[in-house]
Amino acid sequence: MQLVMLGPPGAGKGTQAKRLAERLGVPHISTGDILRGAAAAGTPLGKRASRYMDDGALVPDSVMVGLVEERLAQPDAGRGFILDGFPRTVAQAEALDGMLSRGGRRLDAVVQVAVPQDELVRRLAGRRVCGDCGMLFQVALDQSPNGRCDSCGGPLLQRDDDREETVGRRLAVYERETAPLVGHYRAKGLLREVVGTGSRDEVFQRIAGELG
């Protein structure tokens, strides 16, 4: 199955995409993780992308499209994938259609995880990431004694793009650039809208129900 996960920052789409990928046996392709890894490694791509990420802005299409096309060409994506963080604009969606068509493939569905804005702000302010293994935690939901990761014991940190001064910009960018994708995919008959509030298990069951 070939899916795209849509939703604003803090909607939980990454967590749900990871669970869904495990159930379906396909790779979870998170462009955010790839970009942050490149930025941390100091590669030319990472240095270019980090300037935009630090400001809560979108990375240019020219960078993102090439990155995704290269990833989808890898063998493990041949049996399906779940894209998380791409496309973020209608232009990127059209580029994705083109790269899939060239390989004789197409999207099966697009899942939109919808969450009210005040809830998004609360979630982002309470989000922490393990500095060692990268696992995400929500301080209101997860047990994280002494500020350490439950999985590996690493330190829990707040990402720069989750800080209060950046969150507002990120949500504004989403509304301006990414929200139009909802109408784009609805017109194609691919959109599956899911309420993203409630427990993680409840949201996952809603997504699974939409996908059959």
Image (cartoon, grey):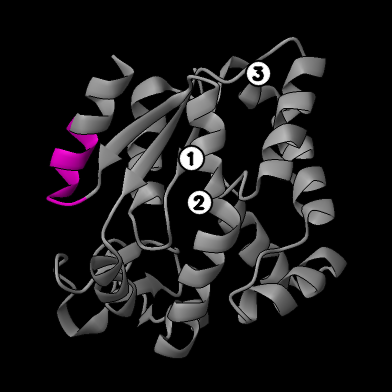
Task: Residue under label 3, please give it.
Answer: 78
Question: Which residue is at the far bottom?
Answer: 165
Give the residue at x 20% y 74%: 139
Q: CA distance from mark 3 to mark 2?
A: 28 Å
Residue 105, image x, y percentages: 68, 13
Residue 47, image x, y percentages: 79, 74
Give the residue at x 17% y 65%: 142
Element at label 3: helix
Give the residue at x 62% y 25%: 76
User: Pointers 3 and 1 in contact (CB under 8 A)?
Assistant: no
The amino acid marked with disc number 3 is: Gly
- Which numbered disc covers residue 182? 1
- Which numbered disc covers residue 179? 2
The amino acid marked with disc number 2 is: Ala
User: Pointers 2 and 1 in contact (CB under 8 A)?
Assistant: yes
Residue 16, image x, y percentages: 33, 42
Magenta residues, start to end: 197-205
Secondary structure mostly taken by the magenta-highlighted segment of the chain: helix
